[in-house]
Image (cartoon, helix red, strand yellow):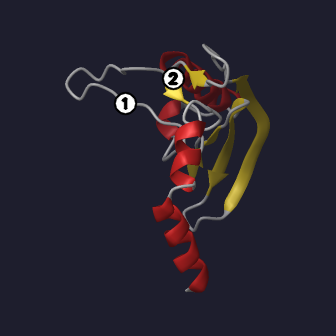
Amino acid sequence: MGNLPPVQLGSPQIAAPCIQWERRGRVCFLHHSLKQNLVEGLYPHTGWVEIDPDVLWLQFLAVIKESVKAAGIEMNQIVGLGISTQRATFITWNKKTGNHFHNFISWQDLRAIELVKSWNNSFLMKVIFFLSSVI
C-alpha cells in the first residue's frame, strides 16, 4: 500500500486530502478530512495579482503536514505527491542562489493586457488567425 496526498494549489486555496492505494492502483481509503489554507494574493497596483513564493511554500508545507497527520500516517509512508497548480502563474529565480527575483505573477494579473491586445490586433496575428480557420 502507498499513501499519496494530491495537492491542489489554486488561487483561493491550497488543499490536500490523503489517498491510500494498493499496488494495483485501486484506491482503498480517501481521508476526507481535507486540510485547506487560503492563498493570500498581493495587489501592489490596480490589475496586478501576485503571490509571495515564500509564504506559499510555508502554506504548502503546513497543508501537507496537517493532512498527513489527520490521516494518521507518517511522512515516510508517503510514496508520491500529485500536484495541480495555478495555470499560467510564473516566477524567475537566480540559478546559483535559488533566490527568486520577484513574487509569483498570477494568471489573473492584467499588467500585460495592452501588449497582448496589440499582438492580437497585429497584421501577422490576423494572418495566422485567418490561415488557422481555413485549415
Q: Where does the N terminus fall, quadrant-wise? A: bottom right
Classify residue 115 as left or right of residue 18.
left
Furthest residue in direction top, as rendered: 44
Q: Nearer the viewer, mark 1 or mark 2?
A: 1
- Name the spot of residue 132 as percent of width and height, x first: 55, 77
- Residue plotted at (67% across, 19% down): 46
Identify the image quadrant of residue 112: top right
**Disc 1 marks which amino acid?**
Thr
- Name the spot of residue 73 as percent of width and height, x first: 61, 34
Q: CA distance from mark 1 to mark 2?
A: 15 Å
Which residue is disc 1 drawn over? 92
Compare residues 35 and 117 and report the one nearer the observer: 117
- Name the spot of residue 58 as percent of width and height, x first: 54, 18
Q: Say whether residue 82 is visible.
A: no
- Residue plotted at (61% across, 24% down): 48
- Residue plotted at (60% across, 38% down): 113
**Disc 2 marks which amino acid?**
Trp
Which residue is disc 2 drawn over? 57
Classify residue 78 as left or right of residue 96.
right
Classify residue 94 as left or right of residue 114.
left
- Classify mark 1: residues with Cα within 10 Å, few (<14), some (14-19) or many (20+): few
Furthest residue in direction left, as rendered: 96
- Residue plotted at (49% across, 47% down): 80
